[in-house]
């Protein structure tokens, strides 16, 4: 029952611009599911749904998976428009960005789920990327530099 309700919630938020938990409850009821606000609240947490600002200026629920897909698809554009310099030292890649852009670039890079990356840390204009080894850092540096040389 829970997995069916979860699937229906994902279907609902992909088809409709759902702004509130009450809207989810109403649409679930129309589809034959009974759920309380507390249940929906837990479902939202389980499904990792987030509210995002739509193009119409209203907030709506989206799946964290779709948000990650959006970040991955715009990675090249964001990276090329924000990154100033890339270099590596042993297994650490250092990325310098325009002021205030490091967090956005870092989040987009994290969404790519690159297996060579162990972890990332972002400040205001600098990102540190820990790679599995020196070779992975050199390879990552080379592949990332391609994004900023395409300008």
Image (tube, rainbow, N blue to C red):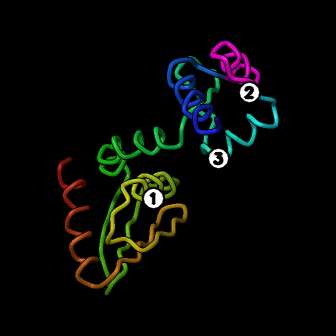
Magenta stretch prevailing secondary structure: helix
- Determine the residue located farthest toward the top in the rendered image: 30
Left or right: 7, with 85 as reference point: right
Residue 150 drawn at (x, y percent):
17, 49
Residue 105 drawn at (x, y percent):
43, 54
Q: Which residue is mark 1?
A: 106
Reply above or below: 121 against 150: below
Instruction: Point out the frontmost of discs 1 and 2.
Output: 2
Residue 19 drawn at (x, y percent):
68, 23
Q: Magenta span covers which residues?
A: 19-34
Q: Which residue is mark 3?
A: 46
Q: Residues within 10 Å of mark 1 (few under 14, many from 20)?
A: many
Q: Say which mark, if any, is on residue 21.
A: 2
SS state under label 1 = helix
Left or right: 112, with 18 as reference point: left
**In front of the other: 77 or 18:** 18
Residue 16 drawn at (x, y percent):
56, 17
Q: Is residue 28 magenta?
A: yes
- The total number of labels drawn is 3
């Amino acid at each position: 029952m829970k997995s069916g309700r979860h699937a229906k919630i994902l279907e609902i938020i992909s088809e409709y611009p759902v702004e509130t938990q009450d809207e989810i409850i109403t649409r679930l009821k129309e589809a034959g599911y009974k759920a309380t606000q507390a249940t929906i609240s837990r479902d939202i947490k389980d499904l990792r749904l987030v509210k995002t600002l739509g193009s119409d200026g209203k907030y709506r629920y989206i799946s964290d998976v779709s948000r990650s897909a959006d970040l991955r698809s715009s990675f090249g554009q964001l990276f090329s428009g924000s990154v100033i310099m890339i270099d590596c030292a042993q297994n650490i890649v250092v990325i310098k960005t325009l002021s205030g852009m490091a967090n956005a670039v870092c989040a987009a890079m994290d969404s790519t789920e690159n297996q060579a990356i162990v972890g990332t840390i972002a400040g205001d204009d600098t990102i540190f990327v820990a790679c599995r080894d020196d070779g992975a850092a050199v390879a990552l540096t080379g592949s990332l530099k391609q994004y900023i040389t395409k300008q």
